[in-house]
Amino acid sequence: MDMEQRYQDRLKRYTTALRNGKPDMIPIRPFVAEFAAKYAGFTCQEVTHDFNKAFEAARKCAADFDWDAVVGNMVYVWTGLTQAIGLKYYGVPGIDVPPNTGFQYREPSEDNAHMREDEYPLLIEDPTGFLFNVWLPRVSADVVAPGAPATFRNNLSFLKGGMAMMNYFGGFVTQAAQLRAESGTPGAIAGILKAPLDILGDKLRGYMGLTMDLLVRRDEVLKACEALMPHLLWVALSGADVEKNVPITIWMHRGCVPFVSKDVFDQIYWPTLKPIIEEIWAKGHQVLFYAEGDWGAHLDAFSELPEGSIIYHVDRGDIFETHRKIGHKFCLSGGIPNYLLGVGTPDEVRGYCKKVIDGVARDGGYVMDASAIIQDDAQIENVRAMTDFTREYGVY
Amino acid sequence: MKAMDTNQPIAPNRKPGVCISWEDKRRELGEIKGDAELVRKIWEDVDALGYVYIWHCLVSF
């Protein structure tokens, strides 16, 4: 088949489902990360440290599996870049962890948080200045704080880091064109968003520090989240699909019960995220809620959003309950347990896919995917079973 | 004219997409003999790359 025609057919199938419509068949869009390395014969070190190998692995998967959309590199973190900047918080495959272990994120102890508890006013006053002048010197082994003597490694960090980032981001453009030409596969997502409270916990105060702050300085936490909002919106829109076909993705981490109380979600997490989603939607972009873990306690809040404004990805939540509560407004994706792809049999995978398709996809508005990002524990025959069964059984 | 201290790091009310605002840069330049609008646009476009860098360090990496 003509690759461009295949691309257009897949894009239409995928975007119809994203808008909660009923395409010709269920689109398949697995977020394959280290699985792609395993399939293509690379180590985790190779695809994490050499993004061209990660791109190659993604293209090989796209060519060999009948998938309707893929991410150009779902491993995403390129440790060549993080090393150029001198970032200290990654465990790099082949250096800090074995070459066939995926990269790790090292959260500092409470005493060594990247932002101290008394620095909220600085962050609130000038988030960008805080990142350059306080945060980056702490998270980088090479960057020195203003006032300290300039160093060769400091200067080189910005030069190498900036050029490496442009090189990497530019690589995604080429990758998208190659995926289109070689296998007729559209990109699945464009643009990145994190919730203000998640950023505060993940990269600034650490989860433990943040939970203490929520007890003793909640007002400052709220003000910090409010200060981060316009910047996170800007970053999200800056990477969005200019054609407005595929969604910006929010990677949702620890803003849900039981990581935080329902009060914290209701009073801080959601009031500082919802306006961002509404603004993105007002500009014509959907947001893929990649709801890692179980966000079932917050479905009522999500249902406040305008119809079609988000796609809700189910990880550990109950996909059938999710469909009952918000499926009339939003497309769902995911819900196939990763453990099943790892230790189950192809028959078990087919059985679970049938259960999900029967339960949530009968009227469209569903995209087939695993619950979480697919790593190298997934068996190739199980991912193939998920793909082939969906293609056969998922025809409308 | 007294030279500005360009090492001053904190600029309250720094907007999204901005590291060093055009207003601040404009004060350094004095008279612009050619197309001021072109100078402004290119300054802001390139300045935004610095913003993209630091915020992607935070959000993406």
Image: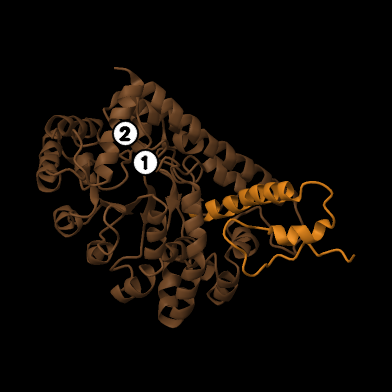
Task: Decide if residue A67 is on the left or right side of residue A232.
Answer: left
Rendered location of residue A309, percent (x, y): 31, 54
Quadrant of residue B15 within the rendered picture: bottom right
Rendered location of residue A104, percent (x, y): 43, 50
Which is more N-terminal, label 1 or label 2?
2
User: Dot 1, crowdedness within 10 Å: few (<14), some or many (≥20)?
Assistant: many
Output the chain of dot 1. A
Output the chain of dot 2. A
Quadrant of residue A103 within the rendered picture: top left
Give A119 or A301, whichever is nearer the viewer.
A301
Colour mode?
by chain
| Residue drawn at (50%, 62%) of the image | A230
Residue receiving disc 2: A11
Give A226 or B1, whichever is nearer the viewer.
B1
Give A128 or A306, whichever is nearer the viewer.
A306
Residue A234 visible in image? yes
Residue A41 visible in image? no
Residue receiving disc 1: A245
Q: Colour of chain A?
A: brown
| Residue drawn at (18%, 57%) of the image | A322
Determine the CA span between mark 2 and mark 1: 8 Å
Q: Colour of chain B?
A: orange
Q: Which mark is residue A209?
A: none
- Give the amino acid type for the residue marked by disc 1 in the picture: Asn
Task: Decide if residue A323 is on the left or right side of residue A55.
Answer: left
User: Dot 2, crowdedness within 10 Å: few (<14), some or many (≥20)?
Assistant: many
Most extreme residue toward the bottom is A216
Task: Decide if residue A252 is on the left or right side of residue A352.
Answer: right
Cβ atoms at labels 2 and 1 below 8 Å apart? yes
Q: How many numbered callouts?
A: 2
